[in-house]
Image: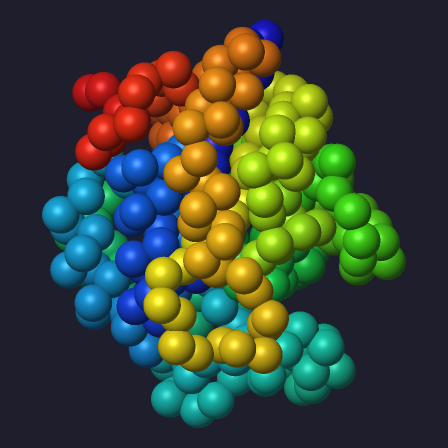
Amino acid sequence: MTARLIVTADDVGLDRGMTAGAIRAHRDGIVTACSIVANGLDFDDAVARLNDVPSLEVGVHLALVEERALTTGRPMPRNYVRFLLGRRGDPEPELRAQIEKVLATGLRVTHLNGHQHLHLLPRIFAIVERLAKEYGIGYVRRVNDRGGRGRRVSMAVLNLLGRRARGTNDRTIGVAEAGHLTVSRIVEMLDHVDGVTELVTHPGLGVTRYGHWCYAWEEETQALCDPRLREAIAARGITLVTPSVARGLRGRVCAPPAPPGPSLCSG
């Protein structure tokens, strides 16, 4: 099987800088898809910008922490620990509301994943999988991370949940080093690409919020736009694809050896 690599920029719509970074890393780099947060503060700005970049596939980054719920307007738990320890009701209405909000913009939704990967929890994943089928969304991320450094305990848990989930991709890379990806580290991770692999990234330009994440948004954006990545991808015989292409769905196939330009994709 030809090794296929999806490169996704998460957290679009949380901050204008995150949206700008995703678009820059698509136009000038290797990003083929992005994930938008329906209850993000800068959601409307993100939708307007994404309408001008139809080659960048859009998915829903389902959020059950940090933001405000669309269904109630109340703050969500601050992080996954408080989510797990708190009292939880049925998440389906909120997940459905987030998907429908993105669909209502007219953007074509090709994939689903979760903020802080909470969609991998078995009860939530079952709902997400069912909603994906209901709304005709053909790709759901599962985390099966390879080649990463650090976060051993949390990554072991995520990988265990991911292996039990019936997601669309075979592997992920980059999750263990979220917000701190460099050219050299991405090149090393490319050796772990097999089947359908998703590189999960977090580019950003001038991000003004979420400083407590301690992410190096600008540096990661620069890394994703470095021409050495295209060369390394081509040298390994890896094909850059979008989520809709990954399983033979309608979409765009991207060629890694293209010179720098406004788009990597051909219709």
Q: Nearer the viewer, residue 120 or 239?
A: 239
* Residue 122 drawn at (x, y percent): 69, 56
Q: Give the answer, above or below, for where 13 lies relative to 53.
A: below
* Residue 103 drawn at (x, y percent): 24, 55
- The residue drawn where x is 27% and y is 38% is 27
Q: Nearer the viewer, residue 170 or 187?
A: 187
Q: Nearer the viewer, residue 117 or 89?
A: 117
- The residue drawn where x is 29% and y is 27% is 260
Image quadrant occupied by the N terminus: top right
Farthest right residue in view: 153
| Observer able to see residue 227 | yes
Q: Give the answer, above or below, for where 38 lies relative to 26.
A: below
| Observer able to see residue 243 | no
- The residue drawn where x is 31% and y is 37% is 28
Residue 49, image quadrant: bottom left
How many numbered circles does the render carry? 0
Farthest bottom residue in view: 74
- The residue drawn where x is 20% and y is 20% is 267
* Residue 112 drawn at (x, y percent): 45, 49
Q: Is residue 243 left or right of residue 149?
A: left
* Residue 181 drawn at (x, y percent): 59, 47
